Image (cartoon, rainbow, N blue to C red):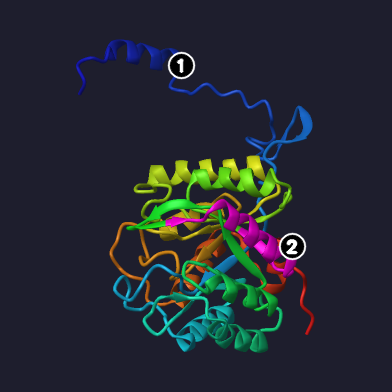
Amino acid sequence: MSDTVHWDRVARGLERDQYRMIWRPYGLPEITDPEHSLFHDGEIQPAWDIPQKIVVQSAITGAFFTRHANPNQPQTTAEILEAARQCVHAGASAIHLHVRDDRGYNTLSVERFEDVVLPLREEFPGLSIDGCYVCALAGEWEQMKIALDRKILDAVPINTAAVYNGDALFAKPAPMILEKTRLVLEAGAAPIIAVYADADVDNAKRYLFASGLLKAGQIWCILPALPGCSPMNNPLQMIDGLQRVTRAIRDVDPEAKMLVCSAGRASSYLVTMAAMMGLHIRVGMEDTVWRWPHRQEKIESNLQAFETARDVVTLLGRDVATPAEYREIMGLACVTA
């Protein structure tokens, strides 16, 4: 028993109040009406402004992680295609992909993109497929232009980034940002503004919005938590960082449609928070190798990553958007069979 409490005064106070709390139920017969007040007709706790439909996109494989990082990483076109098929059958809203060469590195091979995308389009008419044309090597810019001319993808990310990603410098020169955006628009595809850190948002404002090349209502892809990007090394950093970058995007593009990726260690927790904020999410083996931020288990498959996200957003009361609903949400042209 604490010797700092004046127990005699406690006893006198209990006697004075007759062992009863202070209680004035002015709203009888209701004790506490959670929606209304007896004294006015206004609504007390209206439903939050969160969309019922949430995009859950599957990002099958990227340009960064090899099988050294995760032995389960899909690399061949057959593996990428099958992983995408599994996710669409399970209910994925859309597919995002890269393709790899025979060594397992990112490639802009038009033929390899078509080996994956054309069978998907035949099996799933109306499915939106986007992917990265990352022009890092000689000849890849021309390959990108051929791919855009063939209209292989519905949308193409524009990285307004200058970051160290792991031990590699990943920087897009301003002329490339502007010209790639112009080519994507001219091809009839949708640009997706991909940002890794706060400064990338300002780069997008400086070059794409201030120039008039893009208007409000763009698709944004948020990729923090990778090495060298916006740090999310613990839960508080994750929460503060995601709130900051989303506010920065809203300042630039008040009508932005945001996809938050399960990136780095933040992974599944990051997209759970995004779903709670009313945003859309992207999950899969492109953006992380871990199932959980605090454990070492590696992702076994893209299907596993999608099903986990689907279960989480369902528990949060939201419904995974269908491919047709994805096109409507993101403002992409509808496809008729």
* Amino acid of disc 2: Gly
Say which mark, if any, is on residue 152.
none
User: What is the quadrant of the C terminus in the image?
Assistant: bottom right
Residue 258: tell me if it is visible: no
Which is more toward the observer, 171 or 288? 171
Measuring 67% from the left and 25% from the top, which residue is drawn there?
26
* Amino acid of disc 1: Asp
Measuring 26% from the left and 15% from the top, which residue is drawn there?
5
The picture places residue 82, in percent across and down from the top left corner, at 50, 86
Query: Dividing the picture into quarters, in which one does residue 146 lie?
Result: bottom right
Is 292 one of the magenta-colored residues? no
Which is more toward the observer, 70 or 158? 158
The picture places residue 83, in percent across and down from the top left corner, at 49, 82
User: What is the quadrant of the N terminus in the image?
Assistant: top left
Q: Earlier in the sequence, mark 1 or mark 2?
A: 1
Which is more toward the observer, 185 or 290? 185
Is 172 one of the magenta-colored residues? yes
The picture places residue 92, in percent across and down from the top left corner, at 58, 73
Measuring 39% from the left and 13% from the top, which residue is drawn there?
13
- Helix, strand or loop for disc 1: loop
Residue found at the far front of this picture:
138
Measuring 65% from the left and 42% from the top, which residue is drawn there?
252
Provide the residue designation for mark 1. Answer: 17
Give the residues drawn in magenta, as a range.
170-192
Provide the residue designation for mark 2. Answer: 331
**Is 29 placed above or below 281 here?**
above
- Helix, strand or loop for disc 2: loop
Task: Calculate the distance from the C-alpha at mark 1 to the C-alpha at mark 2.
Answer: 63 Å
The picture places residue 62, in percent across and down from the top left corner, at 46, 70
